[in-house]
Image (cartoon, helix red, strand yellow):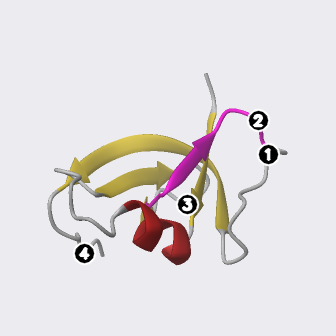
Amino acid sequence: MTHYGVYSKKQFEVVNHDNKHKYPYVYYKVVKTNNIVMITEVFHDANKKSLFDDAVYYGEVEYYGAFKEPQVFS
């Protein structure tokens, strides 16, 4: 199944405002570029849109990992 990744700072802040998530930093690899990016939402339909107005669309992605702290990738 194909996954399409989206990141929204507003969504991240809403979802993690209470710090209850053990691994809030979720990363995926962008298929076209092989870049690792933080994702807040994944769709299975390329035409689906986020409800957050600051959403950045990365296109097709593959799961990379979830972490307790933010990660830096070069």
Cα–Cα span, label 2 and label 4 = 28 Å
**Does the magenta segment cover residue 41?**
yes
Q: Which residue is mark 4?
A: 72
Cα–Cα span, label 4 and label 3 = 16 Å
Cα–Cα span, label 1 and label 2 = 5 Å
Q: Which residues are magenta?
A: 38-46
Label number found at residue 33: 3
Q: Quadrant of the C terminus?
A: bottom left
Q: Which residue is mark 1?
A: 48
Task: Look at 67% across and 78% down and name the residue there.
Answer: 54
Mark toward the viewer: 1 or 3: 1
N-term mark: 1 or 3: 3
Q: Which residue is mark 2?
A: 45
**Does the magenta segment cover residue 3?**
no
Q: Quadrant of residue 46?
A: top right
Amino acid type, label 2: Asp
Cα–Cα span, label 1 and label 3 = 21 Å
Category of crowding for the residue at label 1, using alpha-carbon neighbours closer than 10 angstroms: few (below 14), some (14–19), many (at least 20): few
49 vs 20, nearest the viewer = 20
> Residue 13 location in percent, x, y?
42, 73
